[in-house]
Amino acid sequence: MPPRLNVLTLPRSIPYRPKPRAQWSVPSVTRRLPSQSRLYSDQKDSPPSNADRSKRTDAQPLPSISEEAKATAEARNEDGPRTEQGTPVEEIVKGDKAAQEKLPKVMQDALKAKSSGNTPKGSRSYSTTTTPTTTGGLDMGLVDFGFAPKAPEVPGVKFGLPTLPIPKDAHVKHRYDAVVDQVTNLLMEHGRKSVAQRNMSLILQHLRTSPIPTINPSRPLIPGAPPPSHLPLNPILYLTLAIDSVAPLMRIRSQKGAAGGGMALQIPVPLGQRQRRRTAVQWILGAASKRRNMGSGKGGFAQRIAQELIAVVEGRSGVWDRRNGVHKMGVAARANIVLPRKR
Amino acid sequence: MSSSRCLRRISQLSLDRAGPSSIAPRCLLTLPQSSTFSTSAARNANPQGKKGSAAPPKRGTRTLNVKKGRKDAGKDAGKKPGPGERKAMRKRIVLSNNNALEVSGLKDLEKENALDGSTEGQMVGIHEDAVDVLRAVEAFKPSQGWSLFRRPATLMRKETTQLAQLLKQVEESEQSTTIRRVLVGEKLNGKSTLLLQGLMMASLREWTVISFPEAQELVNAHTEYAPLPGSNPTQYTQDAYTANLLSQFIKANNKLLLSSPLTTTPSLPHPLPPKPTVKQLADLGVANPEASWPVFTALWTELTQPGRPPILLALDGLSHIMQNSAYMSASTTPIHAHDLTLVRHFIDHLSGAKPLPNGGAVLAATCGSNSPTCEALDFSLQVAEARQGTPDKVPLWNQYKDVDARVMECMKDVEILRIRGLSKDEARVVMEYYAASGMLRARVDDGFVGEKWTLAGMGNIGELEKASVRLRVGAMGYR
């Protein structure tokens, strides 16, 4: 085959910033973990005959009692039974042409059938077991990952222990990015998750094909954000950045009757990360639904959300004012916070 | 105004009370016969005062709506786009993404290596001229992922090489050879893309290219139709569609062919300029849609003269033209698609009833997502596949079922080209291209390729694209 594309060199240099991000980090998209795929068990050297077509050890007929006893004794390092006595005649005459000719006709026929590889008469013409189709059949892409079967280091563990710590996205329920998961769920209407997932995919696609955003200096993104030229190539980062940048730090709780005179007391309450993101996404969705729908078909809402996200990063969105309003109110009401008294 | 005319006016007014109002102020007779002390006539004329306009309030304005359960009514108050804007948006073809990285070492497919199979298993770029041709014949579909990459590129997969060999066979044989194939395969397996690749290779080899990009548009009665005079049984022409097809023909075919003079003298309802060229003939059909069908037949006669290049006829969405169309005849019975002249023309060449005198290929692709059920077609394709694979096990039609005999007849001896999933090597090449374009942020190794290949239903390329570059999580198989 001719040489493939060269993927190791990038045509555009990408500035790399080794400085660790103090406040905000995005988990890596990829994970490197040796896959613990279960391989089919090794093949035996060669099956004794075609009579038994099963390749599975448990489905194969047992050897004669004396042979089994001999094998057990060998494994235990003991003296086993002498297999010369009580051994079937066929095995004794095996490879001895002269002796074979003197056998009764029934046994000679059986020997012939065995050597020509025919199925014995008594067996079924169909199989009652499934046969693994590793050779010549369908290749399901599960077997040839290229991992050599390793000898277990720990006794009792067939495929070795997993490398620790187990990555966060190795869990089946947390395999996708946390923000993508949360936004997908917030996009969902009437429990139609598949539609929400499609919309999520379209949003990320729109972010990826839109031009590089210009950051408004009066609406700074969160500190540690990568340069805007990196964003379209990493749409998940783009999405996370837009949401985290407008996420409010607190909400205002109105405590009835606390201010006196029928007024509600405004108390700022801090929000956790997931709550902050949820608020921001809901603001963005609200703003997006008020946008003008340009096209028709399935992708309209996704496109408006993507446009709103770009507007957030570029500082044009009204969501910023909303967040600033909440923060302003929070600052004004900070005197209402009742902290536990110091002893 | 002369006095005689004035008198005539007055005499007319006496006959017709509701005369024209333009002369009303000039004639005393036309004044309303009402008392000056009464206001009832003026009131009756406009009982509601100025408020009487019955038009609903403008969109987006706030109105008092006291019905219950209307809380969310004002949620999506975005203004609606103008006429035609939505469809333009939906059908827009974007072939470039400026954010994607340029893939170094991506070579264009050239005229020399288009058919020789040396690029098998590689990604090749589509040359700019070929891109123009493919755009003109609408070979790029909006649902395909062209908008994600820097410039259009395509994988020369195994089936592409098979198709290239067939085209090569046409070029190299002394006698005229007509290749007739139906491209079949599972949904999202790249049938339309293979058709695109066939069009690309043919246009690079300077073949004449005529393509019906969506068979549905031929039969869904969105364009006008008229019976063809003198046809028995009655056939129907589609003038607007044919004129559009001719304009696509002009854009898609090379200048050399278009500027060559006509060798035949067609008799057309409109006069041709002296010493006409092929392009002038086609232009005549574009300018006069009512004459587009005679022009198309004249053009076809011209293209099949000896010495002209081979022809590639392509159609996407075969099953749409294998049933009744949405058009109605004068006796309000549905018209079978094969009675439409353009469809008839394609079917005659696909079935082999009319060979291409200069050689060429007739390709039809089935569609996995938008195809009406056509049992006769499905059966014919099964038979064709069985004939190629296991000739002793050809299926038989259930005698108790109705059969569309015209479909069975035209698909009698057509051959198929089945498109299967990518091999793992091909999948790896594609994914390396994705990664090199910056659209896939992962290290492409055996484990990753195997995982995505398996998730994509054993190398279904559309699913592979969805799972890797489109960041589509979960719910594989749904759009």
Image (tube, coloured by chain):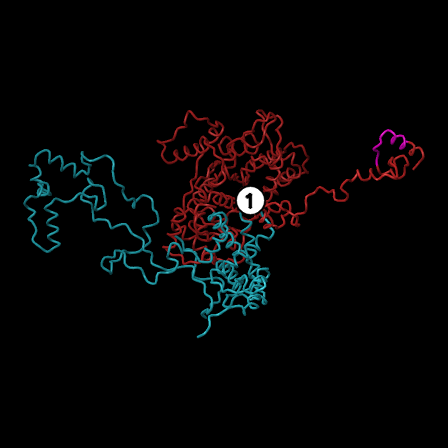
- Is residue A254 shown above or below A191? below
Residue hosting label 1: B138
SS state under label 1: loop
- From the image, give the main secondary structure of the stretch colored magenta: helix
Residue A181 in picture, x, y percent from top left: 45, 55
Q: Farthest residue toward the bottom? A: A343
Left/right of residue B346 with respect to residue A95 in the rendered view: right
- Quarter in which the N terminus of chain B is drawn: top right
Quadrant of the rendered image containing residue B87: top right
Query: Which chain did the renderer colour red?
Result: B
Given residues A103 and A143, the one toward you in this image is: A143
Asked if the stretch drawn in magenta spans residue A132, the answer is: no
Left/right of residue A77 with respect to residue A296 in the rendered view: left
Query: In the figure, what tint was chain A given?
Result: cyan
Using the image, name the chain to which the residue with label 1 belongs: B
Residue A97 in picture, x, y percent from top left: 9, 40
Residue B68 in picture, x, y percent from top left: 59, 45
Disc 1 crowd rating (10 Å Cα; few below 14, some 14-19, many 20+) is some
